[in-house]
C-alpha cells in the first residue's frame, strides 16, 4: 500500500508539475502575444513617422527647387534686361602716366571724360600738363646752357 500511496503521490506531483508548467506556458504565450502587439504598434508608429519625414523632405525639396529656379530666373532677368550703366571713376595713376607719356592722348581723355569721369579725366589732364611743363623746362634749361656755351666761346 505504501507503493500505491507513493505512486498516487507521484502522480499527484506529476499532475501538479504539469499544471504548473501548463500555466507557465500559457503565461509565457500571453506575454509573447503582448510583446508582439507592442512591437507591432511600434512598427506601425515608425512607419507613420517615416511617411511624415518623406512628406516633409519632399515638400522641402520642392521649396528649395522653386527657390533656386526663382533665383535663376531673377538673376537672368536682371542680367539680361538691365544694362550695366555704372561708371567706375577711381582716378588712377596709370591714366596720369599715359597722359604724361603721350600728352595729346591725355588732353583728349581729359576733354572726353570731363563730365562722365571727373577723377580719371583730372588724372589724365594733369599727366599731360606735367609732360608739357617738363618739356618747356627742359627746353629753357637747354637754351640757357647753349647760350652760356656760346657766350664763353666754348663752342
Image (tube, grey):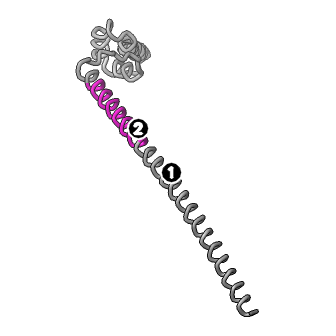
State the residue lying farthest toward the front.
Answer: 1
| Residue in the picture at 58% in, 61% down | 31
Main secondary structure found in the magenta portion: helix
Question: Where does the image place residue 42, in percent across and percent down from the top left?
Answer: 50, 51
State the residue lying farthest toward the right.
Answer: 2
| Residue in the picture at 65% in, 81% down | 14
Give the labeled residue for mark 1. 42
Q: State whether residue 34 appears in this view.
A: yes
Q: In what quadrant of the picture does the N terminus appear?
A: bottom right
Left or right: residue 8 compared with residue 149:
right
**Image quadrant of residue 140?**
top left
| Residue in the picture at 44% in, 16% down | 152
* Residue stretch rendered in magenta on the structure: 52-76
Give the labeled residue for mark 2. 56
41 vs 21: above or below: above
Which comes before the other along the chain, label 1 or label 2? 1
Question: Where does the image place residue 20, in percent across and percent down from the top left?
Answer: 65, 72
How would you rate the neighbour count of disc 2 (Cα within 10 Å): few for under 14, some for 14-19, many for 20 or more? Answer: few
The front one of 33 and 107 is 33
The front one of 81 and 126 is 81
The front one of 10 and 4 is 4
15 vs 31: above or below: below
The front one of 145 and 10 is 10
Left or right: residue 37 compared with residue 153:
right
Residue 73: within the magenta?
A: yes
134 vs 17: above or below: above
Residue 80: within the magenta?
A: no
Amino acid at each position: 500500500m505504501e507503493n500505491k500511496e507513493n505512486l498516487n503521490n507521484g502522480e499527484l506531483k506529476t499532475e501538479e508539475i504539469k499544471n504548473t508548467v501548463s500555466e507557465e506556458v500559457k503565461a509565457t504565450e500571453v506575454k509573447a502575444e503582448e510583446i508582439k502587439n507592442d512591437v507591432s504598434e511600434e512598427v506601425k508608429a515608425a512607419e507613420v513617422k517615416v511617411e511624415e519625414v518623406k512628406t516633409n523632405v519632399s515638400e522641402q525639396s520642392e521649396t528649395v527647387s522653386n527657390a533656386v529656379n526663382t533665383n535663376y530666373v531673377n538673376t537672368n532677368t536682371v542680367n539680361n534686361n538691365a544694362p550695366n550703366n555704372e561708371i567706375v571713376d577711381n582716378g588712377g595713376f596709370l591714366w596720369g602716366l599715359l597722359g604724361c607719356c603721350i600728352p595729346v592722348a591725355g588732353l583728349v581723355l581729359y576733354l572726353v571724360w570731363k563730365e562722365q569721369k571727373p577723377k580719371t579725366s583730372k588724372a589724365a589732364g594733369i599727366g599731360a600738363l606735367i609732360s608739357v611743363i617738363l618739356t618747356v623746362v627742359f627746353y629753357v634749361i637747354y637754351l640757357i646752357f647753349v647760350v652760356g656755351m656760346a657766350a664763353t666761346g666754348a663752342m
